Structures are given as structure tokens and as C-alpha cells.
Amino acid sequence: MNRTQRVITENFNTYKVEEIDKYIENGGFQGLKNALKKGKDFIIDELNTSGLRGRGGAAYPTGKKWNGGRKNHADIKYVLCNADEGEPATFKDRELLVKDPYKVIEGLAISGYTFGAKEGFIYIREEYEFLHSKIRKAIKLAEENGYLGENILGTGFNFTIKVFSGAGAYVCGEGSALIESMEGKAGRPRMKPPRIGVVGYMGKPTQSNNVETLAIVATVLKMGASNYAKYGTEKSIGTKMISLCGNVKKPGTYEIPFGMSLREIIYDIGGGIVGDKDVKFLQLGGVSGPLMPKQYLDTRYTYEDLEAKGFGIGSGAILVADETKSVIKFLESVSYFFFHESCGKCTPCREGKRQMKKLIDKMSKGTATTKDLKNIEKISRIMTDASFCGLGQTAATAMLTAIKYFSPELCSSIDEMKAL
């Protein structure tokens, strides 16, 4: 089995943004050409055959999403590329925008054609400010070469793209909060229904996709879904970009086929653990993901294998912590992040994070009680069940899995247990 692949990442380090001709020479925009030539039914069939699931974390089947969206016959529609990559330990979308911006632009154009939109937006997180001018330049060159703008490739399809900048709010990674931000409002999630596919940007149907998802769309429509489906497993088709970080010798962004084990990813791709220490736990899918103890390292990296054991792929982040790391200190950093990023809209998240932070601080100082530990589990479950959006619903994931797998370490922080 090959350790890494060059399918989505085939163009990495082959051109600079001003060298659109090199992208075209490498087969760039062939996916868009195929889409415009063969039509929307062809696009949906290819996406279904490819088994593509959204790479932003929700993992919803892209073909199903796009097919439903194109049936909405509104007069004005919009498409979005969600590049508000704010999940700590996740940086694979940044690499795509840096090393292959035209593929993302191509995927967004295909999205616009399929959805029936004439205008698209790339919403880039504020912290990626260095990318804004780069992407605008790529858009301009794509227009000058006939791949954006009026009557694209002589087909009558009109489509333009604009860049929006976020303001550093993690919650704006959620689709409706992102749109609120674009409309000049506070970035807070909307009540659902209606979903943004029906009432989105400026009250019009809006389709939002992750950076990696759009890059795969362009790849699939270029190489063919049946060829893409040769990678991965029967249920987790294709390849996945991962952000590997933490206590590994070779952190970075890698493209892997679904089906590798986590052990292979860490040791064969990541080079093992710094200082040749042992693994203590992983956090999968970013800071909102679960903590996985080392006994699961031989689990295959697929949707089905991870879900069967109560874990998930999420954003594609794999953070590795070695045997010297404190679970409590790690939870302290997670708690602080969510306390800082909660938008304050709903009580379960706003007040739940405040109380969790206080209780974890007590655990870190060794002054917590057994009642505190019971309360933090209770608060975590209330937040998960009652929070308004995904931020609050997943903010306690790390804590709940720590309680499940690392309870002896958590109990060691309980004041009255120290004398036992």
C-alpha cells in the first residue's frame, strides 16, 4: 500500500499563482470543461459514484446535497467556498489554497453551474490574510483566460467569484453564522429551518462547501469517478487530506487513501513519536473531536471503522499526544478555547463553558471534589444535547471521552481522593 497519494494534491509545487498556463497544461479546468459539456445530471452521477462526502466535518454525501440544491428554482442563487478553517490542529485547507488555488476556484465554478448560481464567494478566515491577495489574483487571471466571467468557454454560463474576509470568529465556520458575517451582522448561527440552502445569503438559496470538497469535485470530474473510486475502501471511497500534528517527528499535511490504520499514519507517515516516546492519546477532527486512547491505534482511518468505535474523521486533523502529556492540562486548553470562542447566543453553551472552565481549572490545581467531577459530566451532556449550534454541541466532546477513557487520571485531581 502506498503511504501517501497525489490525487487531490497532484498540482502541489508545480506552479505559482501567476502561472495559470502551467495549471492549464497540467489538465487544469478539464473538470469544468467536462461539467459544462456533459451537463448537470452527469455531474451528479459522477459525484454519487465517487462516494464523495463533505470534507468540512459533517461528511454529508455531496452528490445528494448538490442534487437537492439544484431543484430549488429561485431567481437568484449563491455558492460559497467555506475557507474559514478555524479548527485548531487543522490546516489542510490552507495548503490547498496556497499550493493549488485554481483547483478550488474550478470546483466552485462547477458548484455554481450545478446549483444554478451566477455568483460565488470564497470566505477566508481573517488569520489567512496573506492568502487574500493571492486568491484575488487567481480569480482575475481565471477571468482573463475565460474560465470565469461572461459566457464561460462559449457555453453561455456566467459566473463570477468574490473574496470575503472573516474577522477571526471560530463560530463563523458554521454556514449560517458565516452568512450573517457576510451580511455585516454579528457572526451567530441562525435558527433552522429554514436552512441556508433555502434561505441563505441575502435571503437567497445558498450552497456552501468546504475547500477540500471543491478541490475533489474538480479532481473527480477531470479523472472520472470510477478512477477516483479505485482508492480507499468500499464505504469510504477515495483519498483524504489530513493535518498531522502534535508529538510526531514529521508533522504536516498529507493525502492518504482511506483504509490506512492510525498506527501506519503516525509511524509510517509521521515518522513516529518525538524522542521515541509512547503514544498516550490522539484527538481526531480538531479541538471539537474526541480523545482516543492508544489501544485504538490499529483502527482503520475510515468513516465506518471510526464511527463503529465512537470516533470520527471530522475536519481531518490528527493531533498526537505522547505519554508525558497531561490529559487535564490538555482539557484546560480545550476549555479555554471554547470559552473564548462561544458567541454567547444560547445559555447551554455560554454558561456551560463558563462553568466547565471553572471546574477544569480546579482539577488542574488539584482542588476539585467528587461533586465537581459529577457536575462537569452533567454540564457536558446538557451542552451536547441542548446547545444551539455545533460549537456548543461538540465543545464537551473531549471532556466526555476523557471521562470515558482517562477517568483514573481525572480522579487523581480530586482533592479528597489524595489521602486514599
Image (tube, grey):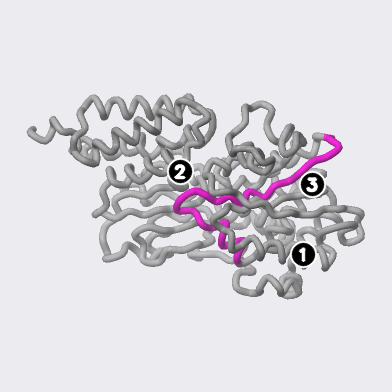
- Whichever of callouts 1 and 2 sits on the residue coming sooner in the sequence is 1
Mark 1 highlights which residue? 140
Q: Where is residue 316 in the image (x, y as percent from the top left)?
A: 50, 51
Residue 358 in view: yes
- Whichever of callouts 3 and 2 sits on the residue coming sooner in the sequence is 3
Mark 3 residue type: Thr
Q: Residue 118 carries which label?
A: none
- Whichever of callouts 1 and 3 sits on the residue coming sooner in the sequence is 3
Q: How crowded is mark 3: few (under 14 residues within 10 Å), some or many (20 or more)?
A: many
Q: Where is residue 90 in the image (x, y as percent from the top left)?
A: 49, 53
Query: Residue, x 65% and y 50% (percent of image)?
Result: 123
Mark 3 highlights which residue? 114
Q: Hey, which residue is sitting farthest left in the picture? A: 419
CA gap, disc 1 and disc 2: 42 Å
Q: In this view, does 71 lie above or below 170?
A: above
Mark 1 residue type: Lys
Q: Which mark is residue 306?
A: 2
Q: Circle 3 sits in a helix, a strand or a loop, which is it?
A: helix
CA gap, disc 1 and disc 3: 22 Å
Q: Residues within 10 Å of mark 2 (few under 14, many from 20)?
A: some
